[in-house]
Each structure stands twice: as C-alpha cells, then as structure tokens.
Image (cartoon, helix red, strand yellow):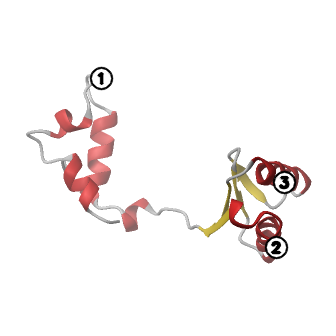
Amino acid sequence: MLLVVTYSKAARGTLRNVCRTHDETVVRRFGRAALFDETEFGAFLALRLREKHGGDVQIERTEPLNEFAAVAADVRDAAEAYENRETPSTPYDKFAAGTDHPDPSTLRSRDL
C-alpha cells in the first residue's frame, strides 16, 4: 500500500477530493493521511498530490505487519497477558516487573 500524508490545509483538501473521486483506490482514510492501493493508479494519484503541493505531501510504501514473522514471541505473549491483566489501571512497567515479560526499556531498544 501507499501511505500519503499531507502537511498543509490545501494538501488536505486536495487529498479529500481525490479520496472522494477515486474511492475504489483508497484503502483507508485518516483525515490528513490515506492509504492507497499499491497500483500504478494509486501511485499516479499520490504523485499528482506531491506535484501539486510539493513538500506538503509525503508518500511512503507500506506493508502489513506479520506479527508472527516480525515480532518475537515474548512480545506477543506480553501484549496478550497485559491486555488480560486483572487490574486494568496497572501500567505496563509495573505489570512486567518480576515476570518473564520484557520491560519497557528492553522493548524500546529492540528493533523489529
């Protein structure tokens, strides 16, 4: 998919118009950003926006996250355990203390 992010009011307006006119190419809309199908037409629309608004439009190529291939099992297990904790108000750092779950500083330092 192609992620198109706009940084000005004019670029947001053009993005909104493009999304309304070509909804078959728009995967999802997020206000100032949108995901386009990764097709040549999606690329055409994204490049057209950048041509019109220059640096006020950023285009990135994205790919879905396969959590089983990209994320370590201990991180998946920690997320599952944390969401099923008995006390919803417990912050993660306190929840992870004294367990086998990775602490927040470890998670921040590891790349996917």
Residue occupying the far right of the picture: 21
Whichever of callouts 3 and 2 sits on the residue coming sooner in the sequence is 3
Q: CA distance from mark 2 to mark 1?
A: 47 Å
Under mark 3, the amino acid is Thr
Q: Position of residue 43 (x, y in %)?
A: 76, 73
Contact, CB < 8 Å: mark 2 with mark 1? no
Q: Nearer the viewer, residue 47 or 98?
A: 47
Contact, CB < 8 Å: mark 3 with mark 2? no
Q: Which mark is residue 75?
A: none
The answer to whether residue 1 is seen in the rendering is no
Instruction: Please count the marks in the image.
Output: 3
Left or right: 91, with 98 as reference point: right
Circle 2 sits in a helix, a strand or a loop, which is it?
helix
Assess disc 1: are there few (<14), some (14-19) or many (≥20) residues with their C-alpha within 10 Å of its C-alpha: few
Assess disc 2: are there few (<14), some (14-19) or many (≥20) residues with their C-alpha within 10 Å of its C-alpha: few
Q: Which residue is mark 2?
A: 44
Circle 1 sits in a helix, a strand or a loop, which is it?
loop
Q: Which residue is mark 1?
A: 89
Q: Residue at x 78, y 54 (%)?
A: 11
Question: Which quadrant does the N terminus fall into?
Answer: bottom right
Q: Which residue is mark 3?
A: 14
Q: Is residue 82 above or below residue 65?
A: above
Q: Quadrant of residue 58?
A: bottom right
Q: Residue at x 78, y 72 (%)?
A: 47
